[in-house]
Amino acid sequence: MLHRRIFQFLIVYLLGIGLLFGIKIVLNLSDYVIPGPAGVWQTGQAEFSRYVGDVLDTFAVAVIGQVLSILMALGVGVAGRRATWLGSFIKVAAYNVQAYPIVAIAPILFILLGDGFLTRLFIAAMICYFPLLLSVIGIMSEPVTDIEHFYRVTGRLRWQLEVKIRAFENLHKLTTVISGSATLAMAGTIVAEFIAANAGIGYSIRIALYQSDLAKILVALFIIGITLSLYQGILELLGAGLKKVWAAG
Amino acid sequence: MKPGMTIHRLAAVLLLLIVGNGLTAADPVLAQEKVVYRLKWLINASTAGDVFALDQGFFSREGLAVAVKAGGPERDALRELELGYAQFGVASADQVIRALAKGASVIVLAQLFQVNPLQWIYRADDFSLTRTQDLEGRTVGITYGGNDETIMRALLASAGMNENQVRLASVRYDYTPFFENQVPVWPVYRNTQGIFLSDKLAAGGERVAFFDPSEHGVRFVANSVVTSQKMMDLHPETVGRFTRALLAGWQAAMSPARETAVIQAVAQYDRDTSESVMRRQLTVTRQMIQPDPGIPVGHIDATAWQQTEQIMIQQRLIPGPVNVVDRLKTQQSP
């Protein structure tokens, strides 16, 4: 699963970079507009270790943000699964808050929390929390009638069992959503660093943009892509393992 | 006369009128050559001459239909020149030199700012910065990767100071660290943000002063008008007409007598800045565009360009010399 993820990423990356080099050759563009393969390679050699450190820094924040989001989404999703006033309120609030562009909220966070770890964490969590929440609410509010009926008529269906049944029956969906939210968490952290931080790969990309250095950005994208592919692959493996353990138990 | 013939004649006359009218109306449009001019930043007092040239018909009198487009952090006029999205643009000297170092073919047509508006603001009541050495031990804001970082490093090096003697702090568009005095020396564009921040602090009873690198030996060139070598080779006459119209527009815009008209032109785009603030912004802009009446608007200061290139080589921002002086219009055949 892991090697397939990496292989797929490499195909996408090479296709993208190949397209750029193609455009450069066809339009006879200078290295200022699109760097050549040699330039990207040299930049990669010069910046690789520094950018790996930056990506790992970003990744650490993204993972913490994602874990927080998952916990919050599960908690709120379970609470909001019922067709009660509170459930409906949580859904409406989630939809509304998701509609706010993070670039508009980021400066407020920056004023409140400064330009450090907390701002990055908060933005990462915000960006991946709401899609997660909506998915969890969707999954948790959908009854698994065949199974739940038996427990309901025998009077043994408590809320914990209901949540467990729905989670187990939709484990594949949940794993996909959680794995997908890793991308959102990473993107959220990078956006936060771009707008309001002094560390991480988003901050380095911002500097590279100031310097009009596309080669640095291509190197950064490569490392981000590889890291995310690995992480998503690991999450999928964990999901598959969890299902096996759960089924055996 | 048969009724059918009358209808035919009427129709023919009508057709002639429509075609004739269409041709007459199309004439000036056909005469106007369309070009795109990409600015470096959003439209404000720093682009007064650009929008005034458009508003007052300086371009159209030269037979040009110019689309003046606002810039921004993600806009790069030099890239747009090469990709053909724009024919003219505004770029800072460091952008031009970086582009030349990477093989771009750029020509500098005019240097808009004779004094770089990028300066550092500080509270005049707290301390005084009369020499670069006065920065020692202070927290100084810089935008990492931006040209203020390059300028500050050049200042420190020229004063024989070690970078450890000051605390460099990363800044962005949020001024909170300056207001809270966490970063007391803050980079600003003197003619725009500088006015706004002075007002904010004045409201709290505080006075400000500015640290100008050019007064301490660092003459790092700011916004300049650029085009591509291709444009220069294929349409030299268009380049000449554009430059003439633009500089005439800037010259007119910098006249205090036309201040109200200039403010009206800028206000069409910059709706968030009040008229009184804009007046003060224009006063400072004038001093930076034409500090000496003997120097024409748009004058290219080749020595300052050479110094800018030298600074970038010293700081290893470019791998080697690019001979930027050869790319200045003063060195080109007209």
Image (cartoon, coloured by chain):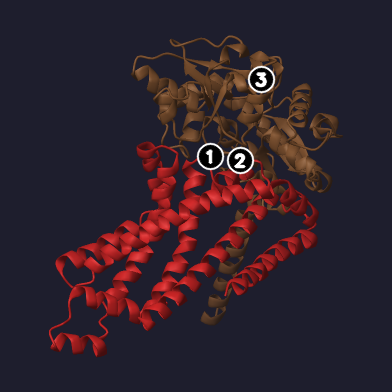
User: Among all residues in the image, which is located at the extreme front?
Assistant: A249
Mark 3 surroundings: few (<14), some (14-19) or many (≥20) residues within 10 A: few
Whether residue B241 is visible, yes or no, is no
Mark 2 surroundings: few (<14), some (14-19) or many (≥20) residues within 10 A: many
Q: Earlier in the sequence, mark 3 or mark 1?
A: 1
Task: State which chain disc 3 sits on.
Answer: B
- Side of A67 where A190 appears, left or right: right
The part of the image, by quadrant, that contains residue B56 is top right
Q: Earlier in the sequence, mark 2 or mark 3?
A: 2
Task: State which chain disc 2 sits on.
Answer: B
Q: Nearer the viewer, residue B169 or B10?
A: B169
Task: State which chain disc 1 sits on.
Answer: B
Name the image quarter holding the N terminus of chain B. Answer: bottom right
3 or 1: mark nearer the eye: 3
Residue type at tag 3: Asn
Q: Are marks 3 and 1 on the same chain?
A: yes
2 or 3: mark nearer the eye: 3
Task: Say above or below: B137 vs A44.
Answer: above
Whether residue A20 is visible, yes or no, is yes
| Residue A159 rendering spot, x and y as whole percentages | 19, 74
SS class of the residue under badge 1? loop
- The circle drawn on residue B162 is 3
Residue type at tag 2: Leu
Callout count = 3
User: Among all residues in the image, which is located at the extreme right?
Assistant: B333
